[in-house]
């Protein structure tokens, strides 16, 4: 599956952004990861047919959801903080699981990344 992520940008702390990821076909397990220079890519949010999961630092601020008709997934980000600054990637897995996987090796397809910058 091909993925294309977009929607990043520059926003002030406390602001909101919505990231979008277009998929070339229907998918099941999807996730958002993010990466800053010199650090490992980290899990942000994930969704399966029966589960959703968020990393602790974004709980209550980020919401991941999908539009199955348009083959899109979204990451609504609110109350953004400077530490949310990163390149955000959407990812898809060929395997349909009951629980969200938080390890990047479990995902087979990746979008190109979109930069999110939060100024203080």
Image (cartoon, helix red, strand yellow):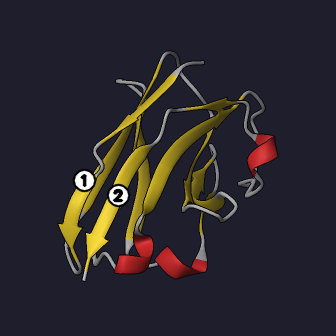
Instruction: Judge from the rendering whether residue 30 lies leftward or rightward of residue 98; answer left or right.
Output: left
Q: What residue would you read off at disc 1?
A: 9
Residue 75 seen in render: no
Report the front residue among 1 and 88: 88
Q: Is residue 119 visible?
A: yes
> Any mark on residue 25, and which?
none
Cβ–Cβ below 8 Å for labels 1 and 2?
yes
Residue 36 rendering spot, x and y as whole percentages: 54, 62
Dot 1, crowdedness within 10 Å: few (<14), some or many (≥20)?
Answer: some
- Does 86 sit above or below residue 2? below
The x, y position of residue 29, in whole percent, is 65, 39
Mark closest to the chain's N terminus, 1 or 2: 1
Q: Residues within 10 Å of mark 2 (few under 14, many from 20)?
A: many
Classify the position of the C terminus by image quarter: bottom left
Residue 91 position (above or below residue 25): below
> Residue 99, percent across and down?
75, 54
- Circle 2 sits on which residue? 116
């Amino acid at each position: 599956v091909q993925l294309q992520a977009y929607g990043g940008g520059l926003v002030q702390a406390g602001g909101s952004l919505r990231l979008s990821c277009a998929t070339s076909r229907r998918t099941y397990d999807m996730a958002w990861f993010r990466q800053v220079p010199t650090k490992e890519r980290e899990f942000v949010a994930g969704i399966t047919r029966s589960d959703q999961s968020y990393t602790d630092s974004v709980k209550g601020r980020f919401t991941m959801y999908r539009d199955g008709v348009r083959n899109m997934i979204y990451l609504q980000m609110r109350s953004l903080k400077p530490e949310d600054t990163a390149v955000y990637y959407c990812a898809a897995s060929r395997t349909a699981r009951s629980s969200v996987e938080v390890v990047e090796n479990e995902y087979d397809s990746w979008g190109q990344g979109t930069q999110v910058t939060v100024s203080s």
